[in-house]
Image: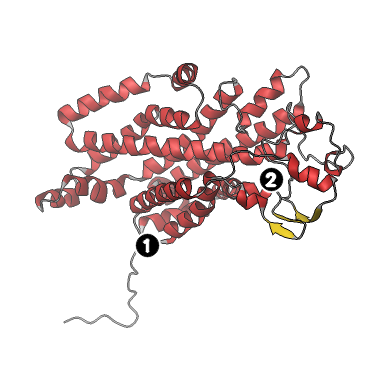
Amino acid sequence: MTELSAGTDMKQPSQPWTTQVAVSLLGRTSARIGLSWIGLLVIIATFSPFLASSHPLYLVVDGQASSPLLQHMTPLDWVWLAGLPMILVIALLPLPLWKKFLSAMVGLGLTAMIAYTVVSPPALVIYEQYRELEATGKVETMIRAPIPYSAKDYLRDYADTGIESPLLTSEQRIHWMGTDENGADVASRMIHASRIALGIGFIATGIALVIGTIIGGLMGYFSGIVDIIGMRLVEIFEAIPTLFLLLSFVAFFGRSIYMMMVIIGITAWSGYARYVRAEFLKLRQQDFVQAAVACGLPLRSILFRHMLPNGLAPLLVATSFGVASAILAEATLSFLGLGLIDDPSWGQLLNQAVQSSTFNWWLAVFPGGAIFLTVFSYNLLGESLRDAVDPHTNRSKRA
């Protein structure tokens, strides 16, 4: 028996594919820039009630201490606060990428069910009560958010009441990004609007990703008549103009952020189906797939446990561009005046900039810059991810 000499180099086991891609991705400057902006947006969206709110964080009146902010937090606020650490923990678990995705979706669903069942904030929200208490000198201690105005706190309506408050005098009232046509603080609306942008991007893309993966996997694995029918279905959905469909639904059924998410997701799955189909057509003849079929494994195991993890590369790239497209679609609809009515949106602020009698530059620069930076960051991330998963690019860089 031949023995290995002490000086012989032993090959170390290779890193998992996801680890190699992550290391290559984080080594690119463009990816770090994009991830930094997206990460900042996620943090701002998660802690937006604590960053911009008319409800004090801590209030002492007549010796009684309370936290009006916590009392008025909505179920959606708690879903964001609980969802971010949960997703971070799931991301660190040693699980396949598709299992992490499913675990995150299930966890967020359960968190939302619990939050909407347990949490019941006051139905009537009165922002003026704190300013009136402060004006009458009844407040002993008050700790406010860095931006002491909620997104729906229209100070113009309060000013019409004639009540004077030190907080509302023009000398002491500070609005870092100005106010909109209704007197609401633009910085506060920008912060809370980041939830709309991120939420519609991730949820709409998630819906499209699930539908496209299932249909594309069946098309690529079975081929034949299933592939022909599936491709005709893909062509039909690719011919549907998403923006005009959104406009039609808004005209007939009213404005709803959830309806926008579903429509964008249902009309955007065809691209993902094409990517999955192409990968599965290539993988279906591989030895490991044939071995799985010979062992009698169920179809769902062959498709989603053995083939899908090996065809994730183009899906990851397409997902980053899909999120950017969904954000642009919502911003376009809001800019046209057909978006959400009262909820803050970057596109809605842009609409106010052009609809007012005088051009208010701050209503165009700040939300327009946020839309540009967000879409640009996702595009940077997509380009970097495409280079990271492309073996030819990595080989040329090493050479």
Q: Which is nearer the eye, 29 or 352?
A: 352
Colouring convention used in this rendered image of the protein: secondary structure
- Which mark, by number, is residue 94? 1
In this picture, residue 63 sits left or right of residue 332: right
Q: Residues within 10 Å of mark 2 (few under 14, many from 20)?
A: many
Q: CA distance from mark 1 to mark 2?
A: 37 Å
Task: Please state the horizontal and vertical placement of residue 380, each as a whole percent of the image.
Answer: 54, 41
Count the marks. 2
- Residue 131 lies in quadrant: top right
Task: Please state the horizontal and vertical placement of residue 100, each as a whole percent of the image.
Answer: 38, 53
Task: Please state the horizontal and vertical placement of residue 228, each as a whole percent of the image.
Answer: 21, 25
Element carrying mark 1:
loop
On screen, residue 179 above or below 144: above
One can see residue 147 in this view:
yes
**Amino acid marked by disc 1:** Pro
Residue at image x 62%, y 32%? 346
Element carrying mark 2:
loop
One can see residue 318 in this view:
no
In this picture, residue 302 sits left or right of residue 21: left
- The residue where tag 2 is placed is 52
- Residue 359 lies in quadrant: top right
